[in-house]
Image: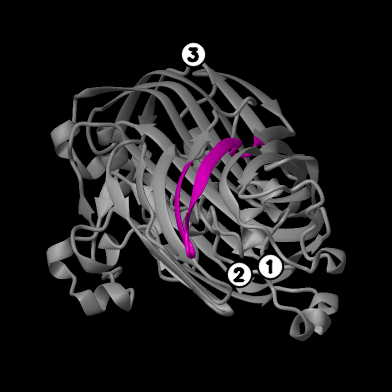
Amino acid sequence: MRRILVVGFCLFTVSLFSQDRLGLSNSNYMPVTTVMNNPSSIVDSYTWLDINLVGASLFFENNYLYMEGDKLTVADRFQFKFGFDKSPGENLSHFNKNFFVDLTVPLPSASVVIGRQSGGWVTNFRTMVDLEGVPYQVAQGLYSGFANLPQYFNQKVDAQNLRITQMSWLETGPSFGSFVYSFDEDVITVGGSIKMLWGITGVAAKIDKWSYTTVDKNVMAIDDFKATVAGAVGFGCGTGMSADFGITYKRFFKWSNHYRPNDIRKSCNRMPYRFKVMAAIIDLGSIKFTKDATLTTYENGKNNWQNYTNSSANTVDAVTSFFGQMFAPNTVTTTTQNSFTMGLPTSITAGIDYNVGYGFYAGASTMIGLPSFLLLGPQRQFQLAVIPRYERKFFEMSIPISTLNFQDLRVGLMMRMGFITIGTDRLNTFLFGDVYAADFFLLLKMPFHTSPKCEDRTPKRKLAPYCPQFR
């Protein structure tokens, strides 16, 4: 299972875009990207037509393996030379170990503003790896091999509520949004997305109890084992649907009853807001795996596992066979099914954004990962961020300051320069310290800020200035 624990470091060498996109979450110019956090963000966007050409996404975080900072130069960090040919360091503190990878590849997508309504189509390839509640002895055993840890021989280990999940899928579908309330200075917009899902990989092990003693290099005595293990691999091995729903409240600087963004009848002007408040629920759905799928439930497992060193789980999809080799006949009670369902990483997002004036904004956002309502499925991490930013039509910069599960403080940087957007949520990964986590993002887009009809009339009109006049 060594590859499970180091997969995040390996993926980082090809990563281009982070899990949470904190620097972009409140942007007014990136609707086809912000729609993933809140579908109502595409309404009244400052970009009339936003086309995503290419991008990729990765976020990696763990509290076990790390690359030693004193062995990395700044050049190594910026060139992604993290020494993957060397063994990473191990955090041997006596705490449960967690591991999370979120890889997203945005495929060609677009969104467009049509008066008070907006629409779009989004397509993504996504992968999540989620290990939670892994005791440090189990983490070391899975990484180094149980037989290579004599310090744990004849020591009983009780692992409970351990979860290993890996899910990959392709998603595509439309997004819609509209004004639903507009009176005086107040505007409320709503939005939603519906996506079809095609499962590519679904592997999960939900271990309620695993009590074992490594006797020596040849025998592992299993005293009790209760778990559910499922697996399916191959494009189209599962299908499903998901939905996102969002709402945004905006307080404008002036009367907004007849405001229609990008409408020639209203001089094509966009009205700046004083502040906006946003909330959404995303990734509400599941995938049912039915093709070459197996789900096995283990109860009352007890066995002396002989020659356990001949068994391994070097890849995530080998987890099912790894646990299946633990028991001889009549040493465990099992039930088997030919299908199983995995829930998506359903989350609640919320944010606020205040217009300081002259292109400067002060914002905050949060994401709360909800436990899967179904038996199996990955779960997002909790995050909280403060996001100051400066934005104009062809340039934007933000410095997100965030925490993940209240465990550390991260400072990032995002810059949008015309067609290119780059950034990271963890600048320290590129500057100093041991590397436990990493992310970096790059997007190539084609933004059209004004509709063709409005552009034809622009030279004949003196448009109102973008910056608000404070009262």
Total marks in image:
3
Residue 64 shows in this picture: yes
Residue at point 68%, 43% (across, down): 185
- Residue named by callout 1: 47
Q: Residue furthest front?
A: 471
Q: Is the residue 381 above or below the residue 389 in the image?
A: above
Instruction: State the CA–CA distance, disc 3 to disc 2.
Output: 72 Å
Going from the N terminus, do you reach mark 3 or mark 1 first? 1
- Residue named by callout 2: 465
Q: Is residue 341 part of the magenta span, yes or no?
A: no
Q: Secondary structure at mark 1?
A: loop
Going from the N terminus, do you reach mark 1 or mark 2 first? 1
Front of the two marks 1 and 2: 2
Mark 2 crowd level (few <14, some 14–19, many ≥20, 10 Å Cα): few
Front of the two marks 3 and 1: 1
Question: In the image, 226: left or right of 221?
Answer: right
